[in-house]
Amino acid sequence: KAGVTQTPRYLIKTRGQQVTLSCSPISGHRSVSWYQQTPGQGLQFLFEYFSETQRNKGNFPGRFSGRQFSNSRSEMNVSTLELGDSALYLCASSLEGPGGSTDTQYFGPGTRLTVL
Amino acid sequence: AQTVTQSQPEMSVQEAETVTLSCTYDTSESDYYLFWYKQPPSRQMILVIRQEAYKQQNATENRFSVNFQKAAKSFSLKISDSQLGDAAMYFCAWASSGAGSYQLTFGKGTKLSVIP
């Protein structure tokens, strides 16, 4: 079974631009979560989607948004990029979502975003 | 808010020896899940081991085992017979089993070096 895939793997943008990152979950997984990883803040939760519905959102500004499609693929969008948005963005998929009784989150390789 | 603390930013171990990574967490919930994830230089997060809080028995996965002390809110990872491939960042994570959460809360990580 193919793992979680994220595209693109690397991205360079300039301040003020917007960016869209994509995540394809493992086949059959309906939950997709997004995390931001930086050296200073570590891993921080962005949001989680299940069957096209956002169930939880982390403490990020409204510039960060996401969506999930009927095939469970997910995208996240960051508008008006700032230098501090430079990070590794990780996507994770699971059957039920974090905390499910038998669930495990599987992570993708991440998208490295650099904002200049 | 739930917090996860890893007090050892860096650790090293001789190849074939045993090392223990520490993790403490703070929660008022009684039912939850704990995880150890490994992130090698390739940046792909890999689940090492998972523990359900309602289970008294400590989880084991081959050379990896945990010491789960619920009352003390402690969840340490023991790696036996350390191998060069074990060198990585290790993250402790917590997830609620209750509805409405759907996120992993991570510690800051411990960088493990394995000395040949």
Image (tube, coloured by chain):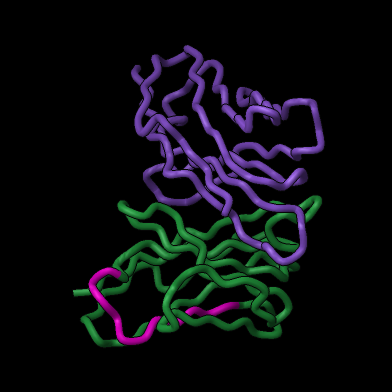
The mark total stands at: 0
- A20 lies left or right of B68: left
Q: Is residue A83 magenta?
A: yes
- B61 lies left or right of B10: right
Compared to A28, does B40 lie above or below? above
Compared to B8, does B48 lie above or below? below
- A13 lies left or right of B42: left
Residue at position x 37%, y 25% in the image: B11
Task: Determine the image quadrant of residue B89.
Answer: top left
Of residue B73 and residue A7, the one placed in the foreground of this image is B73
Quadrant (top left, top right, bottom left, bottom right) of the C terminus of chain B: top left
Chain coloured purple here: B
Q: Give the residues drawn in magenta, as a range.
A: A74-84
Residue at position x 38%, y 34% in the image: B111
Coordinates of residue B59 in the picture (x, y in percent): 72, 29
Coordinates of residue B19 in the picture (x, y in percent): 48, 18
Chain coloured green here: A
Coordinates of residue B56 in the picture (x, y in percent): 80, 28
Residue at position x 42%, y 44% in the image: B108
